[in-house]
Image (cartoon, coloured by chain):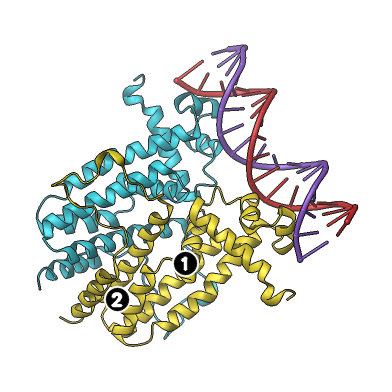
Chain colours: A yellow, B cyan, C red, D purple
Amino acid sequence: MTSPRSSARERILDAYQACLNDLGERAATLDAVAAAAGVSKGGLIYHFASKEALAAGLVERLERLGRDDVEAMGSTAESAVGHFIRSAAHAQSPFGLTAQAVQTLARSGHVGAVRTMHALEQEWYDVLLRATGDRVVARMAQLVGDGIYYNAALAVTEPATVDPDETGEPGEAEAHPALPSPAEQEDLVRALLRMIDD
Amino acid sequence: MTSPRSSARERILDAYQACLNDLGERAATLDAVAAAAGVSKGGLIYHFASKEALAAGLVERLERLGRDDVEAMGSTAESAVGHFIRSAAHAQSPFGLTAQAVQTLARSGHVGAVRTMHALEQEWYDVLLRATGDRVVARMAQLVGDGIYYNAALAVTEPATVDPDETGEPGEAEAHPALPSPAEQEDLVRALLRMIDD
DNA sequence: GTCTATATTTGGATAGAC
DNA sequence: GTCTATCCAAATATAGAC
């Protein structure tokens, strides 16, 4: 409650998030985060007293953004499935970046992160089930979305490798992008909606 | 090439894998791995000269197991989609455990792990596309499988929490298990196969 | 092949100046 | 509110005994 919207805290959380996404949990040290945020370690510690406080802050941010995301799904099959798939594929959104970082935390054994991710999964499923009225479609939509999140996480880590000694070999199966294009996203949404008591 | 099938190496890799899956990358220290494998740190180092060698060994194991898994998919739509979904849900299999551990490594920024996971994803997609002849179905099947892997990873980390003060509240949406049951798996497979030029 | 030291480095956190 | 300096614990890796 000091600077306008306590922007220092937010900038530090952004930096932590970016370190987690780009370098992994191991490399997301206080030094690295401080450097990325443009402050000293001491400056960082003033805002977040410990590493754990930093993690807790990020989890809390996800809970906030997650509530908005769930709400934005609406209650019709079209809106719920459509929003869920498109939102998952939009890896660069504030929500996507935070979700990915918290996923990394969860994977590192952070209990709060695991709990929050589980709760979010459950909420998504509830909305999808109510909106579609079909258990199989709801489950499938959720897994497709999770799969997209999973691929987004792998994709970001990768340094856009183009192997120089095997470009354009003709006749080999074409490489498909890790994330579905917008057109593919719409194909997926349509296919899921068509499945409803079909 | 000393003990029968150099079982010490394998036991150490098993221990490393288990540490990664149960505790996360951060906690998978040489001490922890040595303890889990029942050897001293020095004993471990004799077999794997560095932390990096340990990681490389695990990635290599996944490449071996991955080749078998891709081959087991077969070439019909039924066999490919069916095997892929069931294999993903079988989180406790040797392949599942290794895949999960390497996923954790990938998430921690290990470049070899990222590369191998990407290659595996591409191979799965190629087989699914050839077997189904349908881009949307192949992509959907792959994302569903990835989603299952993702949930399996979250599920294992969780210490089977049963929150004591909110059990069996009537009227709340029932909690669905993170991993689809065998019956649900078959529903998913059937739904995917029905989608083929439908 | 496996163990017990031990050296080296790094990461997390404190104290206190500005 | 932010910085520098410093302490302490933990993690990787080495050396060499058994």
Q: Position of residue A108 (x, y in %)?
A: 51, 53
Q: Are marks 1 and 2 on the same chain?
A: yes
Disc 1: CA contacts within 10 A as few (<14), some (14-19) or many (>=20): many
**Chain ID of residue with mark 2:** A
Residue B82, disc: none
Q: Is residue B83 left or right of residue B162?
A: left
Q: Is residue A54 left or right of residue A109?
A: right
The part of the image, by quadrant, that contains residue B77 is bottom left
Q: Position of residue B68 (x, y in %)?
A: 21, 42
In the picture of the structure, the residue carrying the numbered disc 2 is A138
What's under tag 1, amino acid-wise? Answer: Met
Query: What residue appears at the point 44 percent right and 32 percent down from the top-left corner?
Result: B53
Cα separation, mark 1 vs mark 2, equals: 18 Å
Q: Circle 2 sits in a helix, a strand or a loop, which is it?
A: helix
Q: Position of residue A95 (x, y in %)?
A: 48, 71
Residue A117, disc: 1
**Nearer to me, B46 or A168:** A168
